[in-house]
Each structure stands twice: as C-alpha cells, then as structure tokens.
Image (tube, rainbow, N blue to C red):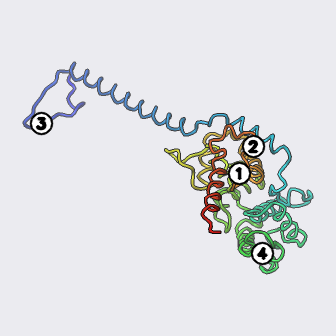
Amino acid sequence: MTCDGILPTCRGSLDFHLHAQDQMNWFRVVSFSCVWAASLVQEAYILQFMYVGEAPANWEKVLQGIRQMRSSPDEHEPVAHEETADNTVLPKERRFAVLASSLLSSQTKGHVSRGASQCLHENGLLTAEAMNKADEETIKKLIYPVGFYTRKASYLKKVANICLMKYDGDIPSSIEELLLLPGVGPKIAHLVMIRGWNNVQGICVDTHVHRICNRLGWVSRSGSKQKTLTPEETRQRLQLWLPKEEWVPINPLLVGFGRSICTPLRPHCGECSVSSFCPSAYKEASSFSSKSKKFTLNKKP
C-alpha cells in the first residue's frame, strides 16, 4: 500500500521519495501542529473577550453607594405621561405616547418634558392620527419650552406620519426600525423599547451616564485605556460586563447622581461617598480651581 496522492510531490531538480512510515509520521506532526495552532487562536480569541468583558473592581460597592446617596427618586427623571394614563388607552396609543414623550425628554429637564407631554395629552394630540393632523405651529406652542422645541415639533409631525402610514398608528418594534425615525438616536430607541415594548435591548446612555462611567474608569476605548468618545461607544463597552438586571435602573440612578453630585463642571467629590473608588476624584475640581486662580492672578487690576 502506498500513500501516493495523499501528500503533494515535488518534481524538478529536487526529487525526493519518502517511505510510507515516514509519510505517516510527517502527517501526524503536521496534523498535531495544525490542531495546536488552532487551539492557540481559539484561546486568544476567548481571552480577548474575557478581558474586554471583565468587570471593574468594586463596581457593586460603587453602585450601592450611589443608590444610598440617591435613596429618593430623582425629581428630574423623565417620566412619560402614559405611565399615569387610564387603562382605557389602546396599547398602540400608549406606545405612541411613550415615543412622543421620549422625544420630548431629550436634552430637557424631566418636569419640563412631563409638562409638555401633559399639554399634548390635554389637547388630544398623543396619538399618531391626531398628531399627524395637527398644525406644526400648534405643536410648537404646546411643547414649549422643551429644548429644541421647533425641531422637535417637526420630528413629531414626521414620526406621526410614518407611524400612521407604516404601522397603523403603532410604533416600530425593533431598535433598527426605531433608529430610522427622525430625531431618534440609540438612547431614545432603547428607552422606547423598554417603556413601550417592555423589551430590554440595551442600556439608555445619555451624557450623564457617559460622563460618570468614564470618570469611574468603567469603560474605555477598545484596546486602550482612553475614555470612550460617545454615549453609544460607552453603551457598547458597558454592556460587555454590566449584568443585564442593571441595564434599566442604571440610567435614572446615574442621571440623578450626575445632576446632583457628579456634575459636568466642578463635581462635588467631597460630598460623594464613593470617591475613594473613583480614579477621577478631586482631579477635575482641582484642575478647574487651578485655572480659575491662574486667571485671577493674571488679570489686570
């Protein structure tokens, strides 16, 4: 029995012949090498994701500490009007109200966006059909003074028309479809999936969650220790290690914390009970203070 045809043969100036036993030994070595190399690649792949998804030290203590500091519900947390509506509202109308209220809550304090949602409700405009028929100027007046109210009035009109034409007055049921709507970004899309469809697809990451997670060192850019650049990048990195049961509560928790203690400028690190776990503690406040002193010293009398 020969092994002709099993292994390639080199012809030309170099002409070699191996005995069957030598061929089999060589085949075993090559096979073992391939399996070994493949296992190394697989192990490296697994280790890479284990590293990427590794939870930061003391994250549970930090969350618990923030919860204790935020023991009362945040007064600024955006709560859509539909959560207090009666049970006679059709499911699709309730979901549209969720979408409209979520659009209004973007870059707006909670009590302001709630007031705007209430005005729309009192005027019968929290359904796709009614919103589509309404005049844009009327919508503007009703939602004022939410942030970017002129732009949001235009978004609401366009969204209402799309929901009416494509979804029979309901709203899209997937992140991908929601992101196609005017004015809807990842944060709003995930918020609507949670409140509208009771479907947790991801974390709602706004500027507060983005800032605080970077200050705590909970997220970083892939393959480096640099801060993430956008809320969406923060969401992706945070979801690699944060348990899913924390995906919903972490947003209102950090939003309230970010407005009261871990503020964008001059964070109140002295009032923070978890500052000992924070690599950014006192750094931003002291940096701001140093710049202020320098400006004062250089200022002419």
Residue type, mark 4 in image: Asn
Q: For numbered disc 4, what is the local secondary structure?
A: helix
- How far, Cα to Cα, is label 2 from label 4? 47 Å
In the rendered image of this protein, does residue 81 appear above or below residue 256? below
Quadrant position of residue 133:
bottom right
Given residues 115 and 68, the one toward you in this image is: 68
Q: Is residue 64 above or below residue 120?
A: above
Q: Residues within 10 Å of mark 3 (few under 14, many from 20)?
A: few
For marks 1 and 4, the one nearer the N-term is 4
Q: Are marks 2 and 4 in contact (CB under 8 Å)?
A: no
Do residues under tags 1 and 2 come within 8 Å of each other at their CB atoms?
yes
Measure how far apart labels 1 and 2 are at the Cα level. 9 Å
**Residue bearing mark 2:** 272
Q: Mark 3 and mark 2: span between their CA atoms?
A: 77 Å
Residue assigned mark 4: 132
Nearer to the camera, 118 or 58: 58
Name the amino acid type tagged 1. Answer: Pro
Label 3 sits on a secondary structure element that is loop
